[in-house]
Image (cartoon, rainbow, N blue to C red):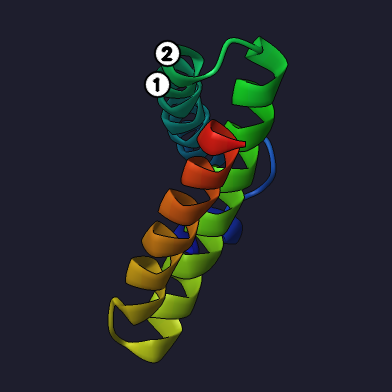
Amino acid sequence: MNAAAEFPAASPERLAVKQHKDEVEQILVEHLNAMFQEQIKAQELALFISFVLEGSIARAGLDGNGTKVHAAKQMIEHLLQQELNG
């Protein structure tokens, strides 16, 4: 993620990172589509989850441990439970 920022916007390196992130988001959408009937809800949740995970990974890198990633996982699990029960 940080290394990609060192390259120009349209460089192959940045495009590869973007493609990977898009693939991860699509995997989330597929799993969420199985959980929720509304496709738009699955897409919105996938985007939200990818943002939360990105932020937690960046913070974990700064903190030097995985505490923020673990917290993000718990927050996402709680959110999904609320959405499913809700």
Observer-side mark, 2 or 1, equals: 2
Please say if the residues under marks 2 and 1 sit with CB atoms less than 8 Å apart. Answer: yes
Locate residue 77, reporting x and y percent.
41, 51
Residue drawn at (39%, 62%) of the image = 74
Q: Residues within 10 Å of mark 2 (few under 14, many from 20)?
A: few
Locate residue 32, reporting x and y percent.
47, 23
Q: Eyeballing the image, is 9 above or below 27? A: below
Distance in Å between CA atoms under marks 2 and 1: 5 Å
Q: Which residue is mark 1?
A: 31
Q: Say which amino acid is labelled 1.
A: His
Locate residue 57, reporting x and y percent.
42, 66
Q: Which residue is mark 2?
A: 34
In this view, the residue in front, 84 or 26, is: 84
Locate residue 75, reporting x and y percent.
48, 61
Helix, strand or loop for disc 2:
helix
Q: Say which amino acid is labelled 2.
A: Ala
In this view, the residue in front, 29 or 58, is: 29
Labelled disc at residue 63: none
- Extreme residue in the left direction: 65
Residue drawn at (53%, 36%) of the image = 85
Q: Eyeballing the image, is 40 above or below 76? A: above
Q: Residues within 10 Å of mark 1 (few under 14, many from 20)?
A: few
